[in-house]
Image (cartoon, rainbow, N blue to C red):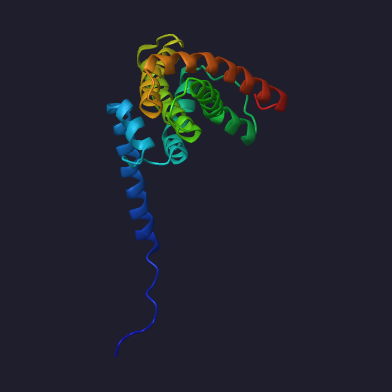
Amino acid sequence: MTDLRPAEPRWVRDIFIAWIHELRSFFATAAAFIRAPRRFGAEWSTGELRAMNPVGFVLASATALLPLDYGVQRTLGWDTRPDVNMAIEIARAMRPFAFAILTGIACHVVLKLLRTRGSVAMTVAVFLYSATFAWALWCVGLLICLVTRADNWLPGVIGVLALPWMALALEGVHRIRWWWCLAVTIATGWVAIQVVRGVLRVAGLT
């Protein structure tokens, strides 16, 4: 006699399968962006390349980079701030991505004045991918400091190395030379940083 009862949900297996799928998508996206940023921007913006959602990419990266960032800085004795509530900690952690979003929007406005082709969503996405790459490089710098006891300027310098990748990816999206993208980003980025810092200061989240 055939058993017509519904099968028991195999939720543990489903979670594992979903986790493996997201992990593969994350590393495939990271590899494509690092290996050929111009092609990544061009092909992803036109739908020729499938990549992990930029917000999902940021959140997936944070699970590894956030503890590493805070932990190494504590070990090095650089983070001497008193313990604060969770809202402030989250605001501090997300501040680079607030910079990235605002800079992406401002950069897009300027690029459109130059009659480029990309959409604002694609521009902001490039900035989110690039900010995650810069965060990873920052953490690499922290680890080098942990081993060598180098000064605290090193992680910032290493993090800036992500800028050429960002500019090349923007070139792929907007079809404009990468040095224009880099110049516009630097100019608009300074303004975005001041705005975010001001908002966080007023909100008491610094």
- Depth order, front residue of 191/93: 191
**Residue 77 position within the rendered picture, expressed as x and y whole percent measured from the top left:** 50, 17
Quadrant of the rendered structure where residue 201 is?
Answer: top right
Quadrant of the rendered structure where residue 102 is?
Answer: top right
State whether residue 34 appears in this view: yes
Q: Looking at this rendering, what residue extends furthest in the left direction? A: 35
Establish if 170 lies above or below 43: above
Residue drawn at x 39%, y 72% as measured from the top left: 8
Q: How many marks?
A: 0
Residue drawn at x 36%, y 46% as measured from the top left: 22
**Residue 73 position within the rendered picture, expressed as x and y whole percent measured from the top left:** 48, 21
> Quadrant location of the C terminus?
top right
- Depth order, front residue of 161/51: 51
Establish if 53 lies above or below 71: below
> Quadrant location of the N terminus?
bottom left
State whether residue 146 appears in this view: no
- Depth order, front residue of 96/93: 96
**Residue 28 position within the rendered picture, expressed as x and y whole percent measured from the top left:** 30, 38
Establish if 143 lies above or below 21: above
Q: Looking at this rendering, what residue extends furthest in the front direction? A: 115
Establish if 165 lies above or below 46: above
**Residue 131 position within the rendered picture, expressed as x and y whole percent measured from the top left:** 45, 26
